[in-house]
Structure formats: structure tokens, C-alpha cells
Image (tube, rainbow, N blue to C red):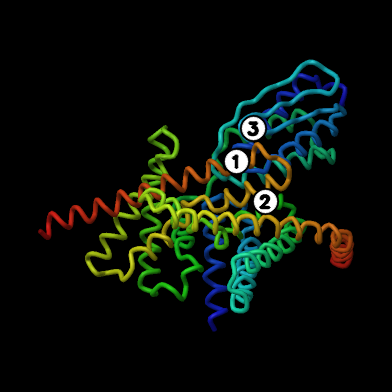
Amino acid sequence: MSNSISEDELIAVCGKIGKILLTSGAETARVESTVEYIGRAAHFEITCHATITALFVGVKNQTKTHLVKARLGDFNLQKVDEINTTSRKFVTGKIDFTTLEEKIDQIDRKVIDFNWPLKILGAGMVSVAPMLLFKATWADLSLAFFVGIIGYLIAVWAGKHIMTPYVAAGCGGFIIGFLAALLETLSIATSAGNIIVSALMPLVPGVAITNSFREIIDRNTISGLVRAVDAIIIAGSIGAGVVIGMSLCSMITGIIGG
Amino acid sequence: MDVLIEFIVSFASSVGFGLITNVPRRSLPAAGITGSVAWVAYYLVLQVNHGLILPNFTAAIVIGILGNISAVLFRVPVNIIYVPSLVSLVPGGIMYLGMRSFTLGKESSTSQYMFNSLTIAISLAVGFVVAEVVFYRIKPLLTRLINHAKKFES
């Protein structure tokens, strides 16, 4: 069975697997080890080098190399899990190469997602930050639940319609800052700052920066640095968005009030 | 009582972030419990030590060990447990505050906030490394236990 796999096919499938893993937020070390495991299971000595923006797959002692370009993507951990399960099945010999190929294609095309009501609920639940539990009032935290949902939805919507990178997060920050400042000036909320920090939790790149340091400690310095810089710029665009939103709100209330 | 509230809210946070990042359903409860246990550990250490490093480091060790154990139990990559359970610990809010100060041109508070978020991120990452070192020591024992339990069931 293993002799029927040609080198080119194997490299193509490995490239696809690596690309899906990279763009759904797996660590580079995991991408490399998964691809190399699959190669070994197919009796080829595959070498794989992954950085966050590119992926090289080749067979050892050969001149052919497959280069796959990847872009930083959002987390989609379910894809990572499905690829992991499928490749594990292939390595243990439960499925053969053609089934692997088909399944990888399927995973690549399929949009794996929770439905929207669940996601909205999730965004709201993240927006009540445990960090602020006994520092902010309960009323503020419950307002942050709704403000966070709106900010998250705006950020997702903007991400779909605006192709310029980093604008989506800025839009989310803008809406959250505007709403929080509005709630404070209408004296519904006590502290706009607490609402903003709490409601921004689904958007801020905290997990990304922690993962980037994990990669740096793992000696994947390039990927770690790319992720860290990306996280800092996202935080910057959110910060700028919030500042613009808050000053817009104070301008509007100034015009109406004065 | 306070600890219970912290536990519930951080559980909700972790599960919520799991929903946003599309964690597979079977590992969602495990991720939630890992996140909330780690947060309670953070909270308890914070009562004794008001620094940034020790509470985060402890929480990261808890996540690292519990996360690796549940990754073995549920057969998922360990990152799938890490990402949602980290959400209440990570320095996202502080990073935002830092970049807002940057936008407003306040130098000293920018460097203060960014330094704090760097400290938190590094202590979490180092905590994971330590936890993984510990986990690979106890992994053979764990797999033996799991095999034992499977035999016992069948």
C-alpha cells in the first residue's frame, strides 16, 4: 500500500495539512511534528520547516521543496483537533492515504463553527472579566456583558467586509469606547474605564502574546516575534479605536449639551 | 463565598472564549474547569503575594498540568485546552491600557503598562515550561492509570 503513494502527492497533502494547522492557530512546533509524523507513517522521510508566514515541505536528500504561503489567521481550534484526529488515524493505520487526502480536503473546505447564538453568548461571557469582579460594580459588569457582545459582533462584521488588516479590531474598540462613554455620560454606568477593559476581553490579543512567548521559549524565535508584534499592533489599533470613540462621544454630548 | 463567585465567573469566561475560538465540544468542560481552577489558584496566591509574577506563574503551572492531563484523557492537542483556559489570566487588558496611553502620548504610563504585560506574559510562558517538565515525569504513571481504568471498565 505504501508504495503506491507518490512523493509529489504526499508533499502536496502535507503542505495542505500544514497550512490548515498554521492558519487555525496551532503552534509551529506542532505543525512541524504532525507533518513529519505523517511522512514517517507513509515511509518517506519528510522534513518540514514552519514559520508563521511560510511552510516548507520536502523529502530528505531531494532537491524538490514545496513552499506554502500562509497568513496569520484567527483561532479555529476545532480544525486543529480534526486534523490531529485524522492524522493520528493515518499514523496508526486505520485509514489509508486516499481517505486521508479526501478528509483533509473536506476539513479545508468545511466551515466548522458554532452557531451564532452560542458565539454571542460566548462573547458576552468572556466580557465579564474575573479580573474586575470585586473592583467594578455589578451593574457595570452586566452592562459590559452587552457592550462586549456588540463590540465583538462589530469586529467580526468589519473583519468580513474590510480587507485592511487591523481595522476590524479598531472598529470593535471604537464601538466599545463610544458606548461605554455614552453610558457614563447618561449616568447609567459608574465607570466607563471598567466597562471598556471588561468588554474588550474577547478582542484583546492576550492569548496571542502569551503563545508568542511560549514559541520564543520553544526556540521558534521568528514565529514568536511575528506573533508578538502582531499582538502589539492589534492592541494599538484597539487602543486608538477606544480613544477615538470616547472623544467622539464627548464631542457629541458637548454639542448637544452646550 | 468570594472564591465560589470567582470560580463560576472564570468558568463562564473560559467556556465563552472556547465558544469564540471553536473548541471541539468534548473538551469544552475540561477547558472551563482548567481555567477556573487556575483562576482560583491565582486568586488565592494573590491574597498572600501582591506581585505580578508569582500568582501568574502558579496559575500557569496549574493550567499546564491539568491541561496536559485532560489532553491525554480527551485525545486533543494541548493547545486546545490552553487557549480558552488562559483567557482570564492573560495581559490583554493591560496591553490595551498601555497602547491607549501610547495613543494619548503618555510615555511613563505606557512603559509601565507594557512592562507589566511583558512580565505577565513571560511568567505565564515560563510556568508552562515548568509544568510540562513536571508532566513528562508523571506521564507514564498517568497512561498506566488510564489503561488500568479501561481494563477495569471492560
- The residue lying at 48 percent from left, 42 percent from top is A233
Quarter of the picture holding the N terminus of chain B: bottom right
Name the image quarter holding residue A168: top left
Quarter of the picture holding the C terminus of chain B: bottom right
Question: In this image, B137 relative to B38: left or right?
Answer: right
Residue on which the image places disc 3: A19
Element class at badge 1: loop
Q: Position of residue A217 (x, y in %)?
A: 71, 48
Residue on which the image places disc 1: A24
Question: In this image, A247 relative to A93: left or right?
Answer: left
| Residue B79 against residue A192 in the figure, above or below | above
Name the kind of residue labelled 2 in the image: Asn
Name the image quarter holding residue A106: top right
- The residue lying at 65 percent from left, 43 percent from top is A26
Residue furthest to the bottom in view is B1
Name the image quarter holding residue A104: top right
Q: Are marks 1 and 2 on the same chain?
A: no
Residue on which the image places disc 2: B79
Q: Position of residue B63 (x, y in %)?
A: 68, 62
Residue furthest to the left in view is A258
- The residue lying at 45 percent from left, 65 percent from top is A128
Q: Chain of mark 3?
A: A
Between A130 and A242, the one lying in front of the other is A242
- Asked whether disc 1 touches disc 2, contact meaning CB atoms under 8 Å apart, the reply is no
